[in-house]
Image (cartoon, coloured by chain):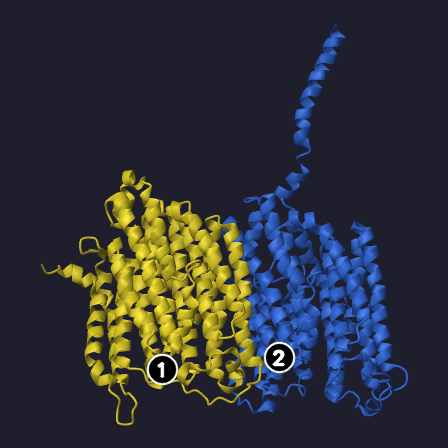
């Protein structure tokens, strides 16, 4: 039986991504073959994949015109799923743009890289619109398995091997949790459709439902690197090729939080079961991430810990959604969370991509001291990195500030006063390590003279988009915020 | 009186200079300095426009500008000036060109960045003073930190990085809790607009519960107290002031510290009067401790710049004391003393910076008998010292006198304790002056030090003229200030607060019933 046209239209971005992913794989033998001078010249495959990602963004206009359920309720295209699609696809596009010269610098085959990034994006897109738990699982697996390979893409680096192994083992463990949770929820309610789970109040009273939902939460918490399920994150983020780190720390996070928010927004009982767990995870993630980041000397690892802290900040908004008194205020919380995800994607992506460019061949220059004197040697790159860092810190006029501000707001309106105070204290702790990078860049003299790094046009463009977006959202959040509100309201 | 765009231009004029600076080549030091100076002077002259147009008899905000910035939550671009902020803005624009002149020869590294940071700082500070929207206020408040942080961290002295970090972390800790309070206040009142919140609270449409008000007050007050800095939160100050370059110290001591006291006057008192009254004794005690402790620690400093830094702790204690005496005279004095301290301490840092330019040290023992090689600088330094010590006829006297006499009316003991600080301030200033300038020249190399150059003389003569003028013609200032301070006091009176005084009749009423019964019994008994 061939699926109906409406169903296919609602799956358009995923289909476009898959086609281009397969295309990139088929072209890989041509692209990955070394030239006569021994280097690979597969930049054109990256170009094709960038085109594919761009086309996928355009193709979201199809489902946007005609939202609704697809494949008998397995998927649901609404403003919420579109919003998350745009984050995920934008991230994929910028990562591909930013990794073209990285791949040739590190002499890595570009064909498979592009294919895997596109496939991972497919998985995340499926997660964004999944309305049914098994579909969520499929999306999760598509994105996870692609990510496992991407993490170990620098095969000659022992750090990357360790990272891939760790990520694979722990990741499989977490998806098993998730799957077991899905099974229990099915056992309790007889369905895996999110909207049916909530509507069936009788079955919802079963005591297996809370256990199932708890296990689902564990699986998802692992994916967003929220404490206490974050142990893998620093090693994996540090070992992975830096553009992949940029991708991993933003894309899957957005998609997984989307699932989390959809469950909180749809399944009534989930809020009650989760709210204190979310509260605790938020606190642990914020303190765990920030305190550990304080003592890091490797900038990439420092930012990995900062990702954990940011997961904690977003969890504050999710907890606020779960604790919200009315449906309207819950929607506000969800809007704040996805607005945060947008801001976070821009600034974290920018920071990691900048480090990918600056760290030089073999990613050898990632220690704090290696950034000494960057402010005078490469003023534009240093200024760009500063914008991202100040936004991560939460300084006004940047996206990070407004995002944090909205989280403060929804946290207080849901009555999570102490959680908000802890969040505030954490942002000061975090200020120390972000500022430390700026100190080193502008206030220390370099110990060693490094050759200047030339950032390619494509990567510059990606960085410029991220920086401009960070500042734009900090100055004029109105339109994006409106869209986030509509997205949150479209959850049922 | 409509003056569209007046305050916007005033706030962002320095940024126009920054844009022009960005065009210049980083090697072209001479033109960078000139352009920065021209911008700062133009900004100063422009800041006199609101002073001329200002109407002293209007209590509310003048030259208001109002535009919507973000729709949800409603955040506005709302600017306005009143008598409290008017002269603080002028103080800022007055000190900026002087600090540019003071850095003329002493800044040789990243010259362009230095002047850009200075001008951005100016915009940020003016923005804080003119914002009437809490969110906008916070934005300027935080953004201003970065140029100051860079000024200390890049162009400062040996321990600059430590000092810069300490400065920014202290301030951020306070301000982030203030942000929580701002958001909370929004949740309660539905607005970020200061006049609107004030009117809602004053008319009793929304009454804050006692605990809420105390927490909100605490969050705001902590942010401001760190900035002032109030004892025991002052420990960032000596480091930041000492390590900053001269221009940084002048701006830091001259204006940034006033942001704290300004914030107390603008936000803590009018928004949270009950909590202000509740905590006033504790705050006054801390202020008095600061006055005396700062003076005593200043006395034993061996480093001239640290001495001036600690003197700020002492002087700002007076300002806080004046504010929390809730007495019109003392509050006028507090605002006036903010200006005086900006001028006097700014001048002190400028002179100390001039000595540093000659000898590259701040240590008092490295100097001695300097009056012989440099009589002009010595004379001007003495003048500035006397102003800081509060000599009658000079500016410091007026402010301190108003504060002390006002405080004496409401709390005599506070005034008596604080007056001790004035004696101490004369001791540490004059004693250090004596060690640096009087006696024999102790070190041979000091004998040949050049006297004040034309540039330095013009800076200090301007300062001395202002000091004298503010000492004699203080009415020109206080006339414009007093309507606004009276307005602050009036805003503090609110139905909710008055009703806390009223409950007395309420418990009295039930008490009247038994007494009426006994009366009835009595009459019955009498009837028997």
Camera-nearest residue between B518 and B41: B518
Q: Quadrant of the N terminus of chain B?
A: bottom right
| Tag of residue B458 | none
Q: Give x and y (percent) for residue A1.
A: 9, 59
**How many residues crowd around disc 2 within 10 Å: few (fewer than 14), some, or many (20 or more)?**
many
Q: Which residue is mark 1?
A: A102
Front label number (2 vs 1): 1
| Tag of residue B40 | 2
Dividing the picture into quadrants, the one containing residue B92 is bottom right
Give me the chain letter of mark 2.
B
The answer to whether residue A429 is left or right of residue B386 is left
In the displayed orientation, state which residue is furthest to the left: A1
Chain A rendering hue: yellow
Dividing the picture into quadrants, the one containing residue B173 is bottom right
Residue B74 seen in the figure: no
Chain rendered blue: B
């Amino acid at each position: 039986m061939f699926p109906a046209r409406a169903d296919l239209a609602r799956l358009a971005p995923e289909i476009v991504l898959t086609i281009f992913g397969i295309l990139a794989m088929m072209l890989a033998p041509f692209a990955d073959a070394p030239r006569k001078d021994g280097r690979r010249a597969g930049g054109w495959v990256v170009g094709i994949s960038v085109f594919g990602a761009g086309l996928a963004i355009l193709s979201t206009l199809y489902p946007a015109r005609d939202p609704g359920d697809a494949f008998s309720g397995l998927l649901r295209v609404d403003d919420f799923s579109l919003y998350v699609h745009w984050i995920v696809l934008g991230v994929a596009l910028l990562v591909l743009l930013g990794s073209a010269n990285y791949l040739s610098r590190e002499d890595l085959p570009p064909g498979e890289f592009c294919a895997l990034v596109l496939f991972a994006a497919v998985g995340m897109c499926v997660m964004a619109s999944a309305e049914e738990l098994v579909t969520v699982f499929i999306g999760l697996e598509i994105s996870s398995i692609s990510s496992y390979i991407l993490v170990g893409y620098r095969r000659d680096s022992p750090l990357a091997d360790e990272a891939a192994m760790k990520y694979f083992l722990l990741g499989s463990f977490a998806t098993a949790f998730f799957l077991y949770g899905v099974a229990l929820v099915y056992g309790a309610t007889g369905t895996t459709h999110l909207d049916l789970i909530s509507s069936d109040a009788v079955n919802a009273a079963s005591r297996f439902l809370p256990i199932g939902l708890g296990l689902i939460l564990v699986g998802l918490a692992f994916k967003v690197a929220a404490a206490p399920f974050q142990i893998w994150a620093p090693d994996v983020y540090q070992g992975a090729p830096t553009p992949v780190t940029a991708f991993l720390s933003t894309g899957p996070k957005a998609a997984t939080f989307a699932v989390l928010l959809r469950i909180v927004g749809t399944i009534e009982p989930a809020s009650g079961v989760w709210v204190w767990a979310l509260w605790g995870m938020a606190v642990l993630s914020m303190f765990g991430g920030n305190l550990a980041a304080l003592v890091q000397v490797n900038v990439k690892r420092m930012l990995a810990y900062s990702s954990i802290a940011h997961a904690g900040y977003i969890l504050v908004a999710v907890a606020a959604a779960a604790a919200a008194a009315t449906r309207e205020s819950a929607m506000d919380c969800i809007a704040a969370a996805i607005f945060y995800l947008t801001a976070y994607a821009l600034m974290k992506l920018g920071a990691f991509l900048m480090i990918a460019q600056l760290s030089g061949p073999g990613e050898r220059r990632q220690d704090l001291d290696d950034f000494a004197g960057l402010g005078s040697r490469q003023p534009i790159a240093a200024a760009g990195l500063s914008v991202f860092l100040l936004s991560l810190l939460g300084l006004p006029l940047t996206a990070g500030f407004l995002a944090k501000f909205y989280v403060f707001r929804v946290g207080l309106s849901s009555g999570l006063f102490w959680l908000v105070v802890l969040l505030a204290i954490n942002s000061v702790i975090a200020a120390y390590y972000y500022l430390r990078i700026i100190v080193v860049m502008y206030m220390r003299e370099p110990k060693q003279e490094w050759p200047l790094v030339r950032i390619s046009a494509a990567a510059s463009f990606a960085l410029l988009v991220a920086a401009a977006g960070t500042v734009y959202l900090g100055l004029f959040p109105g339109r994006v915020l409106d869209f986030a509100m509509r997205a949150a309201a479209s959850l049922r | 009186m409509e003056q569209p765009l007046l305050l916007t231009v005033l706030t962002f004029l320095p940024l126009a200079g920054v844009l022009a600076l960005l065009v210049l080549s980083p090697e072209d030091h001479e033109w960078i300095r000139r352009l920065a100076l021209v911008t700062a002077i133009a900004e100063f002259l422009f800041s006199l426009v609101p002073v001329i147009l200002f109407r002293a008899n209007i209590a509310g905000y003048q030259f208001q500008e109002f535009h919507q910035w973000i729709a949800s939550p409603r955040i506005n671009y709302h600017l306005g000036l009143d008598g409290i902020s008017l002269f603080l803005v002028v103080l800022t624009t007055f000190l900026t060109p002087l600090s540019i002149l003071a850095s003329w020869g002493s800044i040789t590294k990243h010259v362009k960045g230095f002047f850009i940071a200075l001008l951005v700082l100016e915009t940020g500070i003016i923005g804080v003073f003119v914002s009437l929207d809490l969110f906008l206020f916070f934005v300027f408040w935080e953004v201003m930190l970065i140029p100051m942080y860079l000024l200390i961290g890049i162009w400062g002295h040996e321990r600059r990085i430590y000092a810069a970090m300490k400065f920014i972390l202290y301030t951020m800790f306070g301000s982030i809790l203030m942000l929580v309070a701002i958001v909370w206040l929004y949740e309660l009142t539905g607005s970020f607009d200061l006049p609107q919140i004030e009117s809602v609270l004053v008319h009793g449409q929304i009454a804050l519960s006692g605990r809420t008000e105390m927490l909100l007050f605490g969050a705001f007050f902590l942010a401001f107290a760190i900035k002032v800095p109030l004892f025991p939160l002052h420990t960032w100050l000596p480091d930041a002031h000492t390590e900053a370059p001269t221009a940084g110290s002048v701006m830091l001591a001259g204006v940034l510290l006033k942001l704290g006291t300004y914030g107390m006057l603008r936000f803590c008192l009018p928004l949270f009067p009950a909590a202000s009254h509740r905590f006033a004794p504790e705050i006054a005690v801390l202020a008095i401790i600061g006055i005396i402790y700062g003076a005593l620690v200043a006395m034993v400093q061996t480093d001239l710049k640290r001495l001036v830094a600690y003197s700020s702790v002492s002087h700002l204690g007076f300002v806080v004391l004046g504010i929390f005496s809730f007495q019109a005279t003392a509050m006028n004095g507090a605002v006036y003393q903010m200006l005086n301290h900006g001028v006097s301490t700014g001048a002190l840092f400028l002179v100390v910076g001039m000595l540093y330019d000659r000898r590259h040290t701040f240590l008092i023992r490295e100097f001695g008998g300097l009056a012989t090689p440099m009589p002009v600088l010595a004379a001007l330094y003495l003048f500035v010292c006397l102003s800081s010590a509060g000599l009658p006829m000079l500016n410091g006297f007026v402010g301190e006198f108003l504060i002390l006499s006002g405080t004496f009316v409401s709390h005599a003991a506070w005034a008596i304790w604080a007056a001790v600080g004035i004696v101490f301030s004369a001791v540490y200033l004059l004693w250090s002056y004596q060690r640096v300038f009087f006696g024999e020249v102790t070190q041979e190399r000091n004998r040949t030090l050049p006297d004040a150059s034309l540039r330095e003389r013009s800076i200090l003569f301007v300062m001395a003229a202002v000091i004298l003028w503010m000492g004699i013609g203080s009415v020109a200032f206080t006339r414009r200030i007093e309507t606004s301070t009276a307005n602050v006091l009036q805003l503090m009176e609110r139905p909710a607060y008055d009703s806390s005084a009223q409950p007395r009749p309420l418990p009295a009423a039930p008490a009247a019933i038994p007494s009426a019964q006994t009366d009835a019994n009595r009459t019955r008994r009498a009837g028997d």
